[in-house]
Amino acid sequence: MKIKYLSALFLGSTAALYSQQINDTISKEAKIEEVAITGSRNKKRTVIDTPVPIDVIDIKQVSQSTGQVEVNQLLQFSAPSFNSNKQSGSDGADAVDPATLRGLGPDQTLLLLNGKRYHQSSLINLFGTKGRGNTGYDMNTIPIGAIKRIEVLRDGASAQYGSDAIAGVINVILNDRDKGFEGNAFYGMNLFKSPGDKDVVSDHKIDGLTFDFNGNYGTKIGSQGGFANFTAEFINKEYAIRNANPTVYDAPRQRFGDAKSQNVYFFGNIEVPLSDNIKFYSHPGFSHRNTDANAWTRKADADGNIPQVYPNGFNPIQDTSITDFTFDNGLKFKVAGWDADVYNAFGNNRFTYQIDNTINATLDIKSPTSFNAGGHSLLQNTTGFNATKQFGVLEGLNIAFGSEFRYEKFNVIRGQEASYAMYDVNGNIVTSNTDPSLLVINPLTGNIRPGGSQGFPGYSQEVNKSRNNFAAYIDTELDITKKWMVSAAGRFENYSDFGSTINGKFATRYAITPQFALRGSVSTGFRAPSLAQKYYALQFTNFQGGNLVTIQLASNDSDLAVKSGISQLKQETSLNGSVGFTFNTGKFTATVDGYYINVKNRIVLTGNFARTDLPPDVQADYPYIDQAQFFSNAIDTRTKGVDVILSYNETLGNGRLTTTLAGNYNEMEITSVNVSEKLKGKEDIYLSARERAFILASAPKTKINLNVNYKINKFNANIQLVRFDKLTLIGYNGPDDYQTYNAKVTTDLSFGYDFSKNISLTIGSKNLFNRYPTLQREAVSAGNTESGGIFDPVQMGFSGRQAFARFNFRF
C-alpha cells in the first residue's frame, strides 16, 4: 500500500490527526496491505477511497493528550458532527449521556462493536433531557483502555447495517495487541472559580476529583496468529457542584452539577485459529456503573417534606446502578473463495434506581428515607452470517451478502410499594375512590402531601415484552475504471411487531486526478421503534396547584392510547443524500461533504394532555386519569449541513507539526407535526414550542475544532480549541421565554514527555480559560431553566477548568 493512502487513513480522519505520534504510527503500519473500515465490506478500500465520509479516531493517542476518560466526551471534543451532553437533574440521563450525530436523535446512530451490532441502553429519556422520548446507546459501557480505534461513518447506512443507522454508524474496534502490558493512570480535578460576579458557588474550590486506571494485556495463542487481549479499568469521579449563589438568587435547586460516579470494566478480544481456514473469535465484556445524582431541592415547608425528618429540607439522591454484559462469538472461514463469518452477539443492559435521602411524605415520620424504585432491562441476541468475495470484473468487483436474526426483550422492574404509592391517614393506598377527608395534609401549607419517593417515583407496573426480526442484505462495489467506482446495497427486514421494510443505497466516487476526487451517495433508511417506546408505561399520583392529579404515560399498545387516536408505532423512514470531495497531497488533506437528511414519522414523547383535552369517550372511560401522554410518530424533520476537515503536517525544525481544522454546519427544521385526527387542534400540547426548541438544540448550528500538535524528540505539546455555536431554548414560562446560550470557545492544552520507550507523562488543562455556558440570571430566579440551575446542560459542559496528569507505562 502506498504511503499516501496511509497518510490519508490517519490524516484524513477527524481525531487521528490529533495524534502526537503520527509519523511513528505511519512507519509502523506501512506494511499493512489491507484496511477494513466501516461502510465498506471491501477489505481493500481505504478511507480516502470510500464514496462516503469516514473518520478513523486513534483512541489511544487522542486520549493521552486530553483530560477525557469516557468515550462520549472524547468524541464530543474530537468529532465536529458528534454531540453529547452531560446532564444534571434529568433522572437516568445523569448516568447515560444522550449522544447524537449530525443533530439527529440519540437512537438514530447505530453502534457496532468490532463490526457487530451492539445492544442499546434500556433507558428511555423522559424528564428534562435532550432526546426526550428516545432510547439510545450507552457508549460509556465500553472502556477507553479496550479500544484500538473508533470508525465514524457519517452517512445513512440502513441498507448496509439495518435499523438506527439513519444518521450514521459508529464502529468501536477493540485492541488486538498480542504481547506485553500497557497501562495508564489518570488524575484530574476541577479548579473552581465563578464565571461571573460570584453568581455561581461550589462546595469546594477543588472538586470533580477523577481517578482512572486501566491496564491492557496481550498475549499470543499458538503459532498461527492467535491472540488474547484483556482490559481492566476503574474510574472514580466525585461531584462537581455548580449552584446559583443563594444570597443572590432564589434558585429552586441547590445541587446542580456533575454527578458522582464509579465505573468498573473488564473486556476481552480473543482470536484463535482452529485450522488453516477457520478462526474462532470472542469479545466478552462487562461493565458496572454506580451514579449518585442530585434531584431538585425540597425546601423545609415543601409539601413533600417532613420537617421532623429534614428540618432544613433535603436534596433527593438518585443512586442508579447499571450492569452491562456483552458476549460476541463467531467463526471466520473461507469456503469456495468466499470470506465467511458466522456469529452470535449477545448483550444485556440492566438499569435500576435506589432513591436515597428522600421520603414518602404520606407516611409521615414512619417513612423510610431510602427506596428501591425498580428499573428496566434490555436483552438483545443477534445471530448472523456474512460473506464477501472479490471478482475480476473490470477493475474489481466486491460482493458481500448476509442475514441476521435478532431477538429483543424489554422489562420494566416494579419498585417497592412505598416508592410509588400514596397513602391515606390510615396507611391505606389512595385510589380514585378514597374519601378526600382521609388524605394526608401538610399543616404548614394546608395542601395535600404527595406520595411516592421524592425525586423519582418508583415504577408501579411491570412490563415484559419481546420481539424478533429477520434481515437479509446484499452489498456490492465495482471499480469500473481505476478512477471510477460505484457501490450499491439493498436490505430487507421483517419485524414481528410492525412488519417489513426494504431500503437501498447507491454511492459513487470519481478520481479526477490522483489527488482530487468527487464522491456522493443517496439512500433510504429506517429506524424501528424501540421496545421501550412501544411498551413503556408509567403511572403516578401527584399534586398540582393543591389538587390530586393522576398522570399516565400510556404504553403505545394500551386501550387509553388507542381510544385517544394514537396510532401504533411504525418505523421512522429517511431519505439521505451527500456529495463532496477529497483532496490529498500527502502533507495537506481536505475533505468536504454536504448532506441532506429528510426523516418522516420521528418518534417523540408528547406533552401532557389534560383529561378535558382528550376525546369525550376517553374522558368517560377514564375518569380517574387527569393527565396523559404518549409515544407517537409525531414529527417530520429536515436536516442540511456540511462537514469540513482540513489537515496539514510538516517538518518544522527538528520536530513535526500536525494541524487540523475540522468543522460542522448543521441546520434542522421541523417540517410537520403529525397530530392524530382525534387530537386535531392540540398541536401545541402534542409538541409544544419548548419541546421543539429542545429537538432543534440537539446540536449547535456550527461546531469548529482546531488542533495543533508539535512533537520534537521526547517532548510534545498539544492545543485544542473548540467553538460551540449559539443555542436557544425556551423556559417554563411560555414560548416568549427565550433562553439564549451564546457561542463559546473552550481551550485544552497539554504537554507530554517520553522518559523512555516505556514510560511517558502528560500534564495539561481542559477548558483552560474556565468558560461556562451563558448565565441565565433571570431564569434561575424564576426557576424555569430545565435544570433548575443557573444554566442548562449544553454541549460545552458546565464544570469549568480542569487540571490533569496522565502517566503511561508498558512492559
Image (cartoon, grey):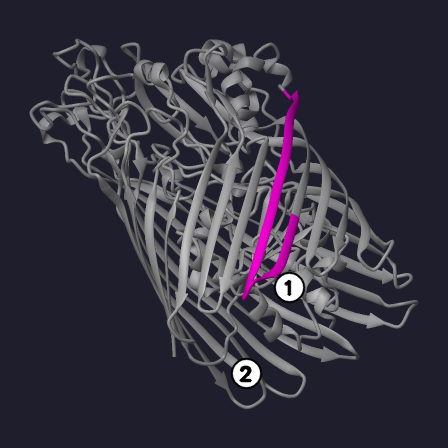
Circles 2 and 1: CB distance less than 8 Å?
A: no
Q: Main secondary structure of the magenta part?
A: strand
* Residue bearing mark 2: 226
Q: Is residue 39 above or below residue 239?
A: below
Residue 176 is situated, as x and y percent measured from the top left of the image, at: 52, 73
- Range shown magenta: 646-674
User: Which quadrant holds residue 461?
Assistant: top left
* Of the pair 590 and 522, the residue shown nearer to us: 590
Residue 671 lies within the magenta run: yes
Residue 524 is situated, as x and y percent measured from the top left of the image, at: 75, 42
Residue 591 lies within the magenta run: no
Residue 811 is situated, as x and y percent measured from the top left of the image, at: 38, 79
* Quadrant containing the N terminus in the rendered view: bottom right
Query: Tag on residue 144?
Result: none
Residue shown at the point (66%, 88%) measured from the top left? 276
Label whose residue precedes the other's in the sequence (2 or 1):
2
* Residue bearing mark 1: 384
**Identity of the amino acid at label 1?**
Gly
**Identity of the amino acid at label 2?**
Gly
Residue shown at the point (55%, 40%) measured from the top left? 100
* Of the pair 58 and 720, the residue shown nearer to us: 720
User: Which quadrant holds residue 183?
Assistant: bottom left
| Label 2 packing within 10 angstroms: few (<14), some (14-19), many (20+) | some
Q: Is residue 334 above or below residue 209?
A: below
What number of labels is visible? 2
Q: Is residue 172 visible?
A: no
Q: Secondary structure at mark 2?
A: strand
Q: Secondary structure at mark 1?
A: strand
Residue shown at the point (52%, 36%) measured from the top left? 723
Residue shown at the point (72%, 65%) measured from the top left? 4
